[in-house]
Amino acid sequence: MSTVLSNFSTWKHFLADRVAQGKTMGLTDETIANLAFEIGSFLDEKVDPKNEEQRVLKQLWDAGDESDRKTLAKLMVKLVQHT
């Protein structure tokens, strides 16, 4: 996982693949967004940011409440779907 996280572009590609895989499996957008929120929570608690993009995301995550964090997770999913 640390290799995936070391480069933001690689992370986005990895996340895009997982989102596409989830859609193929029949997961709803809401389920994917909830999973993205859970992943974000895990990363916030367990992983130090590896680059500037991740540091900004962590600052945004830390500044927000649960609703804001869910929105940020949804936006990350949208970002990787359009990349």
Image (cartoon, grey):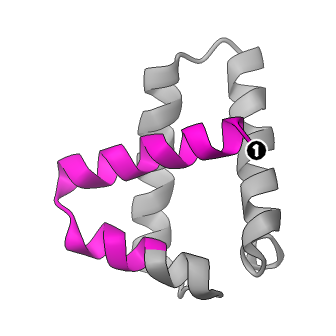
Residue positioned 32% across, 45% down in the render? 70
Does dot 1 land on a helix, a strand or a loop?
A: loop
Is 61 covered by the magenta stretch? yes
- Left or right side of 64 for 23: right
Q: Crowding near pointer 1: few (<14 within 10 Å), some, many (20+)? A: few
Q: In the rendering, at what x and y percent does residue 64 appear? A: 21, 64
Q: Would you say the magenta stretch is mainly helix, strand or loop? A: helix
- Left or right side of 51 for 18: right
Instruction: Please state, as top left, top right, bottom left or bottom right, where the N terminus lies in the image.
Output: bottom right
Range shown magenta: 57-83
Name the amino acid, label 1.
Thr
Identity of the residue furthest to the front in this view: 82
Q: In the rendering, at what x and y percent does residue 26 appear? A: 66, 11
- Vertical order, 22 against 78 (above or below): above
- Vertical order, 47 against 14 (above or below): below
Identity of the residue furthest to the left in this view: 65
- Between 56 and 37, the one lying in front of the other is 56
Identity of the residue furthest to the top in this view: 26
Residue positioned 46% across, 71% down in the render? 57
Q: Quadrant of residue 18?
A: top right
Residue positioned 47% across, 44% down in the render? 75
Q: Which residue is mark 1?
A: 83
Instruction: Please state, as top left, top right, bottom left or bottom right, where the C terminus lies in the image.
Output: top right
Residue positioned 78% across, 29% down in the render? 21
Q: In the rendering, at what x and y percent does residue 41 appear? A: 39, 62
- Vertical order, 31 against 51 (above or below): above
